[in-house]
Amino acid sequence: MNDNLQLLLEFALTRNVVFILMFGALVPIAADLTVRRSLSAGLKHGFVLALAGVIGSALLSLFPDQIAFLSPVAVMVVAISAAAALHGWGELGGEWAGVPRWLLAVAPVAGLQLHFWITDLSGLDAVLAAFGAGVGYYFGIVMVVATIEQIRIAEAPLHAKRLGTLFFAIAIFALGFSGFQFL
Amino acid sequence: MKRFEELTSLEQVLLLGFIPILGATSSLGAALAAAVIGVLSAVLVWLAARLIPASVGNTTRWGTLVALGIGLSYGLSLSAAYLVPLPAAALVYLYLAGATPLVYFGAGSACTVRQCSLLLLRYVAVVLAFGVVREALGNGTLLGVDLWQPGVIPAGILASGTGALLLFAGVAFVSHMRADLKASRARENQA
């Protein structure tokens, strides 16, 4: 398989931001959506994550080795800007647990860039990985929202319709995603 | 899914501290670091939130607090790496501890000092319990010391991210089942 396609698919599946790398609590974001709405909201989230990944990796490469330890400043600026952009785009309004909901988007965006930084991904590889991660994030949002809706309408005892079941489902998705082999 | 206020205290801790609980508990050393970094960042952000005047506006206030939270968790994680042996994979999740909602819960509108302190204590207990279970059962060690007889194979999946998710789900499921059974028993006794 072509190396570029492999990198794109790896970040969409075997290094999925939601199910494998687990950057960010997607549940509070997903709990506010319906499946129909998640189809468009997920696109915005995925696009912002991908764009932030590209900009972040470009900024990270500007830091010379002597001051590489300051790179997370770029990560922080890009992550807060991306979350603000999502908020400005009509997503993540209001509060959750007393904190602004847009704050929930900071972790996946910052996490992806830190992952690029630690694994030393840059240039075209980082662009492909960022768009792969964007696709993976879209899958993640739609799948978690669909699972929440299925749990909600299931005929099951109350304790089986709560967070534990949702996380079992996410773990099963994680097992499935990590099992992909690209040859 | 229920609204945040309707979740059990365990569910609240699991959701607020999602990243360090899942990513930085593969060893007890990393869990200790996650507990200290999470609590210190949360307390300092809470103090900073008290110092920022309301006149600066909501966006500036939260932007400053998020920058402070991430900066603190990054700085503290770098220091922790010198003090405790940390698995390389755990480090990125420790950096990200400052992006978890737990750190900002105290600065938000839904929290009293007592509630925040209890939440942080529960977070420490959960993180350390995850660290002990995952290192002991997943790697067969505790703080690097071998626990099991030679020949016993640890359940390696528990040391992985998926294993953490399964443990996370199991803890939440059992806690709901207990609460459900207790409530139904109480209803039967009343009847």
Image (cartoon, rainbow, N blue to C red):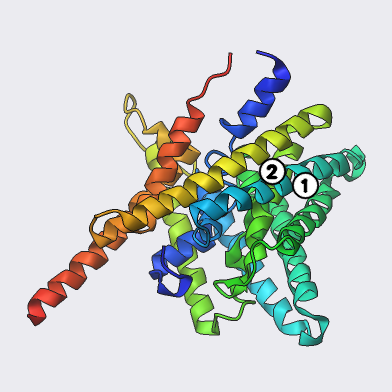
- The local crowd at label 1, few if under 14, some if 14 to 19, many if 20 or more residues have their Cα within 10 Å, is many
Q: Chain of mark 1?
A: A
Residue A169 occupies which quadrant of the picture?
A: top left
Residue B125 higher or lower than B169, as above or below: below
Q: Residue at x 50, y 43 (%)?
A: B26
Residue B46: quarter of image: bottom right
Q: Secondary structure at mark 1?
A: helix
B2 to the left or right of A25: left
- Quarter of the C terminus of chain A within the rendering: top right
Give the residue pinned by disc 2. Answer: A112
Residue drawn at x 71%, y 83% is: B50
Q: Are marks 2 and 1 in contact (CB under 8 Å)?
A: yes
Which element carries disc 2, helix, strand or loop? helix
Amino acid type at circle 2 is Leu
C-alpha gap between disc 2 and disc 1: 9 Å
User: Where is mark 1, residue-wise?
Assistant: A52
- Residue type, label 1: Ala
Image coords of residue A134 (percent x, y): 67, 40
Q: Which mark is residue A23?
A: none
